Image: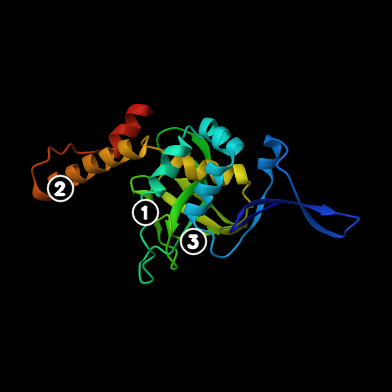
């Protein structure tokens, strides 16, 4: 099992002779598949990015596995991090398991299963925010929490049934991949900021009525696929 402490990633293994958990080295990639069972209070997203960067093996492996230049985002953190707003709506970051069963009988018989771990910001009331377009300094100081509850959503032609409370223990690899894949979704920090400006510009154009809007007819698209 793996614990994330304030001073780094800890791989623990039960020692029958000592009758307690003892810390072991990360001996191979397979160790990254072990479940993360505890995150120490006070560990932030910035800490996790820093721990990954400072470990030469993790830095190189996650860089290839998640397609992310870990060093570029570590360098971004060195420019400063905004303090936490105690009254802010977003209170922590997490990685949450989302499973969706998609089914359609209206146009053609189809079933599809989508399973994924999402990196997101959370509010104490369950609100969630995507973070892929946000500069790291805005949320790197937020605490990172382990969210063991998974959700399964069954979608049938627009109707939804949701089952909550399922238990899932993510591995360290799954957690790191979800984080680094998401924060580098638009490329480097510079590319992300450029994309953010494009999105804000498009939103302003919609608000002031200067944008050219194209109607979206979802049912026509479904019929074309049938």
Disc 1 target residue: 80
User: Relative to the observer, which residue lies in front, 10 or 31?
Assistant: 10
Going 88% across and 58% down the picture, which residue do you hit? Answer: 18
Disc 2 target residue: 204
| Label number found at residue 65 | none
Q: Is residue 104 visible?
A: no
Residue 86 against residue 203 in the figure, above or below: below
Drawn side of residue 65 relative to residue 28, left or right? left
Q: Earlier in the sequence, mark 2 or mark 1?
A: 1
Asked if marks 3 and 1 touch (Cβ < 8 Å), the reply is no
User: Relative to the observer, which residue lies in front, 200 or 116?
Assistant: 200
Drawn side of residue 28 relative to residue 51, left or right? right
How dense is the environment of label 3, judged by Cα within 10 Å: few (below 14), some, or many (20 and up)? Answer: many
How dense is the environment of label 1, judged by Cα within 10 Å: few (below 14), some, or many (20 and up)? Answer: few
Percent across and percent down for residue 40 are 60, 62
How dense is the environment of label 2, judged by Cα within 10 Å: few (below 14), some, or many (20 and up)? Answer: few
Disc 3 target residue: 143
What's the distance in space between the residues labelled 3 and 1, CA to CA? 16 Å
Give the foreground label among 3 and 2.
3
Q: Secondary structure at mark 1?
A: loop
Percent across and percent down for residue 32 are 66, 41
The quadrant of the rendering that contains the C terminus is: top left
């Amino acid at each position: 099992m793996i614990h994330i402490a304030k001073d780094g990633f800890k791989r623990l293994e039960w020692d029958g002779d000592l009758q307690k958990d003892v810390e072991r080295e990360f001996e191979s990639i397979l160790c990254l598949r072990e479940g993360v069972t505890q995150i120490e209070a006070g560990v932030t997203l910035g800490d996790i990015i820093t721990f990954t960067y400072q470990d030469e093996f993790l830095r190189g492996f996650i860089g290839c596995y998640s397609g992310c230049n870990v060093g570029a985002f570590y360098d971004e953190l060195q420019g400063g991090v905004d303090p936490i707003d105690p009254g802010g709506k977003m209170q922590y970051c997490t990685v949450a398991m989302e499973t969706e069963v998609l089914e359609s009988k209206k146009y053609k018989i189809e079933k599809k299963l989508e399973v994924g771990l999402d990196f997101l910001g959370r509010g104490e009331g369950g609100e969630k925010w995507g973070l892929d377009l946000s500069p790291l300094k805005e949320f790197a100081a937020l605490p990172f929490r382990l969210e063991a509850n998974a959700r399964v959503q069954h979608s049938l032609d627009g109707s939804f049934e949701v089952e909550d409370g399922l238990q899932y223990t993510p591995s360290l690899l799954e957690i790191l991949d979800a984080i680094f894949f998401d924060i580098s979704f638009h490329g480097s920090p510079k590319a992300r900021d450029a994309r953010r400006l494009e999105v804000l510009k498009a939103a302003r154009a919609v608000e002031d009525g200067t944008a050219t809007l194209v109607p979206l007819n979802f049912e026509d698209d479904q019929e074309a696929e049938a």
